[in-house]
Amino acid sequence: MFDKVLIANRGEIAVRVARTCRELGVLTAAVYSEADRDALHVRIADEAYSLGPGGPAETYLDIDGVIEVLRHSGADAVHPGYGFLAENAAFARAVAEAGAQFIGPPPAAIEMMGSKLTARDAAARVGVVGVPGRNEPVGSADEILTFAAEWGYPVAIKASYGGGGRGIKIVDGPDDAELALRSARREAESYFGRGDVYLERYLPASRHVEMQITTDRFGDTVWLGERDCSSQRRHQKLIEESPAPGLTDTVRAAMGDAAVRVAGACGYEGAGTVEFLYDDGAFYFLEMNTRLQVEHPVTEFVTGIDLVALQLRVAAGEPLGFTQDQIVRRGHAIECRINAEDPAGGFFFPSPGRITRFRFADGFGVRTDAGYEQGDTIGPEFDNLVAKLVVWGVDREDARRRMIRALDETIIEGIATTIPALRAILTHEDFIAARHSTRFVEDRLDFSMLPPIFVDEDATDDDRVLRTIDAEVDGRRYSVGLFVPGSVGAARAARTRRRHRREATAPSDGTVTAPMQGTIAQLLVATGDVVRTGDVLCVLEAMKMENPIRAQVSGTLREVRVTTGDSVGFGDVVAVIE
């Protein structure tokens, strides 16, 4: 086993890896951006090293910076978590060149499966059929129109090197092609560092079912079971469960066998997930994620296998220690992703801010994986996942009822969260009857009755309070506790605000305001343009999500007060329609 693991990530997955390492007697070293200086993953690790100021590109995606920390920390292994550099072959090679073990598959496997195009080719070579699509990058919007002429609408534009629902846009008609292509490329570049996209036929009534596999370096591969991830919005998962309801044992075994064949096609090693679309009794290869998935806890609950511990042991050269016929799956598990978003009206606007209260649910079969604690701040720079709430039950209905109880017990204040939407999904008749698909949330659920979540922030400092003061010595972070006058933090902590998230509005004077803090990613209009109700005026990026700001009335743009790259706050005037 390793002596020290550098965790090249942040948030709840970095916390999860650190905890498992501690159980195994392995030291951990965290990395952090300046925005994450006081983050939970920093506090829980044995050591922490700064990556400097800046957003993801300048910190967690900076291969040279992370490798410099690796050398300085003396860690003999790197766990990449998910996202950021987890599926970056160049990073995996750099880790090996630095003399450490990358806890993941070989770089060649990452490269083959990292591009959705080469992954589709690899799957086809071993007889696993993919979703109908093109196996080359898109060059222009005209190519989308040509593809649609053959396959029909809707068409899915997908990031070639993407994952996690990022960089996916759906084209419902020819008028949407150009804007959707630009948006998909922009998200892909922002989140994955590469703007390549490709086309697939969009199957709106399908279910998203993925298979967890793991392989040791001796060539033994097993599938641990499937997860249904069909409850989504904006192509990002909200609820996952295992086993997939309504899936027959015959289909499950065939899907598991297909996943094992795909893993063999790329020389895989470690934990990975092969994703499929399941439609009318047939399944189609979608992609392979060469890393740990966000939703891996549901598989852990039904199999009793700690996937992070298994990752570490396999990377250290140990065999799996079990065979396919020794895997036993019991009961049913459900995971809910609690994101910092306001679901009111179905808009799911990002909700950065300070968590003034956080009470976890508890009880038999309940688990919370969180990247934050009470008092922590969720900034707009990174992903908005606050926590994952996971439950186990003897069957699906038992797990569903337990999840509803656990959601009711979970209290998060200071920010808006998706908890009301999650509860609405779990109590909907289609989810209860397992009639849901990937379009279920957006097509069947009505969130218009969910009121805006009002956020109260009221914090005061005592006369003397204990403050944690950070210091960096030779690149390594240390924390020192000091009692200081309460006025030191009063300007920040004693503010009281009452606010709520809403869609960009157009009052009677035609003023269009920003619904949240963020950055103008694209400006589509200019002063003097004539717009109609529903036209997209600009695209606002916040917490790695793109949100179109639309005209709420028809008229002429008297003023456009922003340009591409501008930072705006909640309520800032974007434009005025006359």
Image (spheres, rainbow, N blue to C red):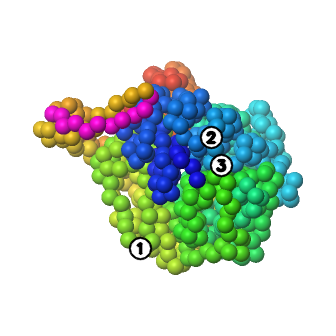
Q: Toward the viewer: 73 or 112? A: 73
Q: CB atoms at circles 2 and 3 under 8 Å apart? A: no
Badge 1 is on which residue? 364
- CA distance for labels 2 and 3: 12 Å
Q: Is residue 38 left or right of residue 336?
A: left
**How busy is the neighbourhood of tag 1: few (under 14 within 10 Å), some, or many (20 plus)?**
few
Is residue 49 visible to us here?
Answer: yes
Where on the picture, by quarter, is residue 241? bottom right
What residue lies at 43% left-to-right and 68% top-to-bottom?
366
Q: Is residue 267 left or right of residue 125?
A: left
Q: Toward the viewer: 577 or 488? A: 488
Q: Is residue 171 left or right of residue 308?
A: right
Q: Amino acid at mark 3?
A: Gly
Magenta stretch: dominant secondary structure: strand
**How busy is the neighbourhood of tag 2: few (under 14 within 10 Å), some, or many (20 plus)?**
many
- CA distance for labels 1 and 3: 32 Å
Badge 3 is on which residue? 104
Which dot marks residue 100? 2
Q: Is residue 476 magenta?
A: yes
Q: Disc 1 or 2, which lies upstream in sequence?
A: 2
Q: From the viewer's perspective, is the residue at label 1 or at label 2 nearer?
A: 2
Decide: is 102 above or below 68: below
**In which quadrant of the rendered image does the C terminus lie?**
top left
- CA distance for labels 1 and 2: 39 Å
Please state the extent of the stretch shown in magenta in the rendering. Answer: 475-485
Rendering coords of residue 110 (x, y %): 72, 44
Q: Is residue 285 magenta?
A: no
Q: Amino acid at mark 1?
A: Phe
Numbered disc 1: secondary structure: loop
